[in-house]
Amino acid sequence: MSRNRRARIHLIRQGLVYSLALCLLILLMGGLGFWWLEPGIHSFQDGLWLAFTTAATVGYGDLVPRTHVGRAFSVLVVLLGLAVLSLVTASLAALFVEQEVEQEERQIERDLMRELHALRRQVEHLHERLDRAMAPREQDTP
């Protein structure tokens, strides 16, 4: 694997880790925010659940923001959640695409090496035929 390719894969993996960390941070902050802002949210776990369902735009409806401040906060959580979850999805897709491209490049390299070996055999065969064809002529010379 080339140094350039390893660097690209490292950056993609690093981007995935940062995206997941940012996602976790947004969920934690969202959970704390909902727990603090919404009177109907009685635990941090409920706040996390509401932050997750809001950020993922699932919205099961079991927990919903009821105050104006909570609803405004949920808009922020939705926008940030969509952005960060999109980054996570894009990072995962880039990782899979990079692996697929790497496999295709390896196959192309193997095919090229097979062709190169076949060409070498043909050249060797042509040299042998040329040597055989030239041998009687060399004997004819005085």
Image: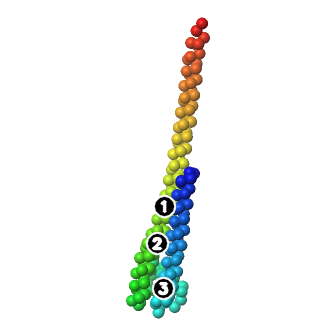
Residue at far top of view: 142
Q: Is residue 80 above or below residue 13?
A: below
Report the residue marked by disc 3. Answer: 33
Q: Quadrant of residue 127?
A: top right
Q: Could you tell me which secondary element the residue under label 3 belongs to?
A: helix
Q: Is residue 52 above or below residue 115?
A: below
Q: Amino acid at mark 2?
A: Val
Q: Amino acid at mark 3?
A: Gly
Q: Is residue 51 above or below residue 13?
A: below
Q: Position of residue 17 (x, y in %)?
A: 54, 68
Disc 2 to disc 3, how far (Cα)? Answer: 18 Å
Number of the front mark, 3 or 1? 3
Q: Which of the marked residues, 2 or 1, is nearer the chain's N terminus? A: 2
Pick the quarter of the image with the C terminus. Answer: top right
The residue under the point 55% across, 40% down is 113
Q: Position of residue 95 (x, y in %)?
A: 51, 61
Q: Amino acid at mark 1?
A: Ala
Disc 3 to disc 1, how far (Cα)? Answer: 32 Å
Disc 2 to disc 1, how far (Cα)? Answer: 15 Å
Report the residue marked by disc 1. Answer: 94
Asked if residue 6 shows in the view, the reply is yes
Q: Could you tell me which secondary element the residue under label 1 belongs to?
A: helix
Q: Could you tell me which secondary element the residue under label 2 belongs to?
A: helix
Q: Is residue 113 above or below residue 133?
A: below
Report the residue marked by disc 2. Answer: 84
